[in-house]
Image: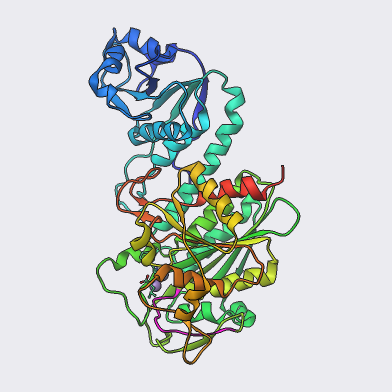
Amino acid sequence: MSLHTTPELLPFDLDQIAASEGRIALFADPETPLPQATKRADRLTRGAVARAVASPGFAKLKPGESLTLAWPAGLKAEALQIIRLPRKPDAAALRKAGISIGRGLDKTPALICLDRLPLAPILQAALLRAYQYEAQKSEPKPGFGPVRVLLRDPETAQDALAEVMARVDSVHLTRDLVNAPANLLTTESFAAQINDMAELGLKIEILNEAALEEAGLRALLAVGQGSESPSKLAILHWQGAEGAPLAVVGKGVMFDTGGVSLKPGAGMEEMTMDMGGAAVTVGLMQLLARRKARANVVGLVGLVENMPDGRAQRPGDVIRSMKGTTIEVINTDAEGRLVLADALWYAQERYTPRAVIDLATLTGAIIVALGHENAGVFANDDALAADFLKAAESVGEGAWRMPLGPAYDTLIKSRIADIKNSAGRPAGSITAAQFLQRFVKEGMPWMHLDIAGVTLTKTESAHAPKGASGWGVLALDALVAAKFEEG
Ligand code: BES
Ligand code: MN
Ligand code: ZN
């Protein structure tokens, strides 16, 4: 369900400024004459706006930051937000302006006076910032009030508005999935929700345990064998073009206790987000379908729960992956790579894709390396990595390239099996990526995104409130648009 009703685009009628209730957002730059809407608000407030814009407080604001006048005399509105924006704002300033607006949005109506400013970057940032997860509260906060936008030519902006809503709804879907607790969002309820996405024109297929056994995905199954929730592989296919697909593979560990290699209790509740890679994959697939992307993309998510139990796998077990590689399970908490090993191999065997991208909350080590600002980008293909970094930059999502290399392979050698699933602390996120690479076919362009640090944040990030961020949906959508979509 959408958090926001679709904003209404209004023709540029300045009388709206006197008449609007709730909040009004408008723009100013101390160095240039006030835009028309701001000038009108200034007249109505008998110069209060111009005084605010000339104040030392306003001078201290960075592009996109704002100050708010409460209960401005002469207006019906209860708040007038003045956003500092230079005459030729760059993409980051526009996004920041939108974030400032979004931070103020609440149940009251809002009027955003854009004039000739571009709709998409500002509105999108505002609606992405104005997210709240209230599903588990017995007395949820009221939703967001209607948003109206004053524009010079509202007709030509309708398509842009539809795209903004597709993106915003999809990022919000990913956040909802990540925020959902593991007792409510199980492998089965997640799969059922994915099944319903067939309505959007996606081809959905859910492989159950029998089908996975039959196809030989023993590594994936081993992770889930201690859980009451049956393991699944869900496939979402958007065929908006001919040719080989791009495959996007997501880690969907509904909850990660660590298994028999049990995690310490403190902070374990966070492991409800261990299906973040699957959530981004699902959000991306919804977005591609909603905007009818002219691209062939198949999303595959491995849905399992990692629990300790009498049937759970143990440290020391040796399992045979779908590829045939045998894996010594040193640590049952290094489970994500087992799920991905089989999901990656299945994706390549079945779809012979143009390229494979996987997303996973894979290692704590990537948080040590990059904190919560950047996801780790591992790739065997420089062009793919560079294209992705550019796409991520364009939407303001942090991403940083990390190294791979055969030297790390010695760390995952096993005494008794082909490889082992854990190499200990040094270079923890790299050895995990190196493990995954063993399940990537020769010559297949591949990129692995370790999103353990960016999926859930304790503080507000550049584009999201604290909690689930939805990181990756926009960056991957931008990558698809730039490199995998027909003209
Ligand atoms: N899901 C965790 C990684 C994780 C940690 C995600 C913190 C988000 C926040 C993963 O399954 C895991 O447990 N990794 C281990 C690997 C180790 C046992 C080799 C880790 O990072 O400690
Ligand atoms: Mn784990
Ligand atoms: Zn995990």
The one of 112 and 390 positioned closer to us in this rendering: 390
Q: Note whether residue 322 is visible.
A: yes
Q: Quadrant of ligand 3?
A: bottom left
Query: Percent x, y for residue 18?
Result: 37, 13
Residue with the most extreme right position: 242
Residue 85 locus on image (x, y percent): 40, 24
The residue depicted at 37 percent of the width and 19 percent of the height is 29
Where does residue 187 sit, x and y in percent of width and height?
Answer: 48, 68
Q: Residue at x 56, y 55 (%)?
A: 385
Quadrant in the picture for residue 314: bottom left
Residue 213 appears left or right of 422 = right
Specify whether residue 328 is painted magenta: yes
Farthest residue, direction bottom: 416
- Specify whether 104 is left or right of 343: left
Q: Residue at x 60, y 60 (%)?
A: 381
Q: Nearer the viewer, residue 341 or 425?
A: 425
Q: Report the span colored magenta.
A: 325-335
Q: Main secondary structure of the magenta part?
A: loop
In the rendered picture of this protein, how many numbered marks are placed on residues? 0
Indicate the quadrant containing the C terminus: top left, top right, bottom left or bottom right: top right
Q: Is residue 252 above or below residue 170?
A: below
Q: Residue at x 45, y 54 (%)?
A: 400
In the rendered view, tell whether residue 300 sits above or below residue 385: below
Q: Is residue 2 magenta?
A: no
Foreground of the two, 295 or 412: 412
Residue 417: percent from left, percent from top: 51, 89
Residue 168 visible, this angle = no
